[in-house]
């Protein structure tokens, strides 16, 4: 959406004349409120309507009818509505409305990403979504090599070049399941899943070069909820290669930028997202995790000796070092961490 990257829209001449005739014009200008924001023209009654809209948006996603009949584009549209209100309310200094929009966004990602691992995806062209988790059961946890997501598609009953099996009852290994097939021109086969589009939006909002700190904090909070809600991040990443690509590239790049922030809230949330990525898709983030450990954790904890005073000079503040140490403690709680680091980095001559 345009409001992710473009500045707030300026009022047209007609809107400016209409706004100048408002009896509250002097009060709004004196209060320093941004009149270019759509919410700046709202009255108390209008704000109450927006609060009801946010509550209704969440209920639409959570009700059985919404889960069964809403298209992927409709789900993304509901998320965009809540996101637009959160951004506009923050620009208009409406803390109550922004808090309600942030809470609605949290519920949206919980519904979308929480149910994605427990039901069939309408965009899945394989036999059934349950095969994805079974296909990854044989993967070794101590191999953090970069996997090709397209190679996993051959584990289903047929390849992309083969003809789809006919609809009806399918029997395999004594298990009977019903397969519902659709025509190749069905829009569901080409429609991007909602969780992929939402992840792309959250990764874009976490860019400190384009967004302010408040928007980055909102994005990082939603990313942590997303990664902690998904039941099987690795299986979903294999099932949707673009989801994996967004997390490997856009998200990791912005996390590396955010790790240099002096804001302790941003740094703490960033380190938490990195840890959640490690828990979810470490098999696909060998290079990224190496960069995070060396360029984030070890950089924050590094020090040098001053040649003049011969005293130790730390590269970061004590609070930042404490956050980095707490993050490393979380990593070290993994039983196989040291063995995996030795096998994947120390034994690899291409790693640092």
Image (cartoon, helix red, strand yellow):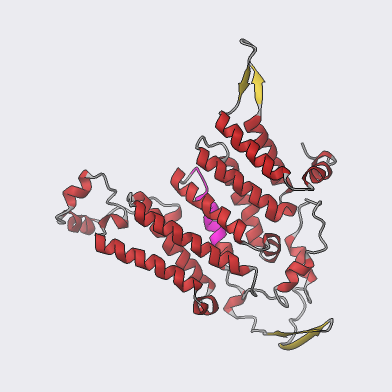
In the displayed structure, 10 sits above or below 74; it is above
The answer to whether any part of residue 283 appears in the image is: yes
Nearest to the observer: residue 124 or residue 68: 68
Q: Quadrant of residue 17?
A: bottom left
* Residue ID at (58%, 39%): 259
> Chief secondary structure of the magenta span?
helix
- Residue 2 visible in the shown view: no
Q: Is residue 349 magenta?
A: no
In this picture, residue 120 sits left or right of residue 39: right
Residue 319 spot, x, y in % from top left: 55, 32
State the extent of the magenta-drawn residues as a range. 198-209
Q: Is residue 58 left or right of residue 242?
A: left
Using residue 346 as the reference point, say whether residue 54 is left or right of it. Answer: left
Q: Nearer the viewer, residue 156 or 219?
A: 219
The residue depicted at 33 percent of the width and 54 percent of the height is 9
Residue drawn where x is 50% and y is 67% of the image: 76
Q: Position of residue 241 (x, y in %)?
A: 67, 62
Q: Quadrant of the C terminus?
A: top right
Measured as percent of width and height from the top left, residue 183 is found at 64, 84
Question: Relative to residue 349, is residue 10 depicted above or below?
Answer: below
Question: Furthest residue to the bottom?
Answer: 168
For the residue pair 243 and 343, the one nearer the viewer reads as 343
- Against 27, residue 150 (above or below) is below
Residue drawn 82% across the image and 56% down it: 140
Q: Quadrant of residue 116?
A: bottom right
Q: Is residue 205 highlighted in magenta? A: yes
Query: Number of labelled discs?
Result: 0
On the image, the x and y values in percent for residue 128 come to 71, 76
Q: Is 296 above or below relative to 167?
A: above
């Amino acid at each position: 959406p345009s409001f992710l990257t473009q500045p707030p829209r300026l009022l047209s001449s007609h809107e400016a004349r209409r706004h100048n005739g408002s009896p509250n014009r002097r009060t709004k200008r004196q209060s320093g409120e941004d009149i270019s924001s759509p919410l700046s023209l709202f009255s108390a009654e209008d704000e109450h309507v927006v609060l009801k809209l946010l509550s209704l948006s969440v209920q639409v996603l959570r009700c059985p009818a919404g889960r069964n009949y809403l298209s992927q584009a409709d789900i993304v549209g509901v998320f965009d509505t809540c996101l637009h209100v959160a951004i506009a309310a923050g620009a208009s200094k409406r803390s109550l409305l922004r808090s309600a929009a942030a809470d609605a966004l949290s519920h949206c990602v919980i519904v979308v990403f929480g149910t994605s691992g427990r039901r069939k995806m309408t965009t899945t062209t394989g036999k059934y979504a349950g095969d994805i988790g079974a296909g990854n059961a044989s993967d070794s946890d101590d191999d953090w090599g970069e996997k090709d997501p397209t190679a996993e598609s051959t584990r289903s009953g047929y390849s992309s070049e083969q003809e789809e099996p006919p609809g009806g009852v399918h029997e395999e290994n004594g298990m009977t399941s019903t397969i519902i097939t659709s025509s190749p021109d069905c829009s569901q086969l080409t429609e991007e899943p909602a969780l992929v589009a939402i992840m792309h939006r959250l990764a874009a909002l976490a860019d400190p070069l384009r967004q302010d700190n408040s928007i980055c904090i909102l994005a990082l909070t939603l990313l942590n909820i997303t990664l902690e809600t998904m039941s099987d991040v690795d299986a979903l990443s294999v099932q949707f290669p673009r989801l994996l690509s967004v997390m490997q590239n856009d998200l990791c790049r912005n996390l590396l930028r955010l790790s240099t922030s002096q804001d302790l809230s941003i740094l703490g949330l960033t380190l938490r997202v990195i840890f959640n990525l490690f828990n979810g898709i470490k098999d696909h983030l060998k290079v990224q995790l190496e960069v995070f450990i060396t360029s984030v954790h070890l950089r924050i904890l590094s020090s040098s000796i001053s040649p003049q005073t011969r005293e130790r000079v730390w590269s970061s503040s004590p609070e930042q070092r404490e956050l980095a140490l707490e993050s490393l403690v979380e990593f070290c709680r993994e039983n196989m961490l040291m063995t995996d680091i030795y096998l994947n980095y120390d034994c690899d001559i291409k790693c640092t």
